[in-house]
Amino acid sequence: MSDADGGLRGVRESARLWFAPARIQREGTTPDYRFSLANERTFLAWIRTALALIGGGFAVDQFLTDHLTHWVRAVLALALLAGGVACTLRAVNHWVRCERAMRQGTDLPASRFPAALALLVTVLAVAMVAVVLFGWAG
């Protein structure tokens, strides 16, 4: 399944496998444990990134009340929160796809999500620089 094919179908499939990990273990052959553990560490790194984005969204909303107008604060906070949710869902999906590929002996799946997430963070950073420089205070 490619990134373009994934979409909602990929999230549904990942959710189904998430609640039935034994199903993944019945596929193919057991890979070297080091690879499975590396896949798990990557998953956990994505979860840490998601938590940071979600925490940043709450921080913007709660602590910048005197520094930003409501709409600017809401847009920035919602973008960070949406990025955190997307990162969490993608982490599960990517973990399942990589585990399956390792068990079946196929190439690991490519993903454009890291580039999309980097673009989102860049846009938000530029927006925050604009806020600091031009001070959209309410």
Image (cartoon, helix red, strand yellow):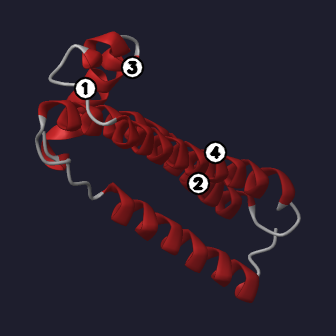
Pointer 3 or 4: first along the chain: 3
Q: Which residue is mark 2?
A: 80
Which residue is depicted at the point 64% across and 45% down? 51
Depth check: give the residue in front, 45 or 66.
Answer: 45
Query: Quick one: label 2, few (<14), some, or many (20+) residues within 10 Å?
Result: many
Which residue is depicted at the point 82% across and 62% down? 64
Q: Amino acid at mark 1?
A: Thr
Tell me the CA gap for discs 3 and 4.
19 Å
Q: Which residue is mark 1?
A: 30
Q: Amino acid at mark 3?
A: Trp
Pointer 1 or 4: first along the chain: 1
Pointer 4 or 2: first along the chain: 4
Pointer 2 or 3: first along the chain: 3
- Nearer to us of marks 2 and 1 is 1
Which residue is depicted at the point 56% across and 69% down? 124
Q: Position of residue 38 (x, y in %)?
A: 42, 45
- Nearer to us of marks 3 and 1 is 1
Pointer 3 or 1: first along the chain: 3
Q: Amino acid at mark 2?
A: Leu
Q: Which residue is mark 4?
A: 51
Q: Which residue is mark 3?
A: 18
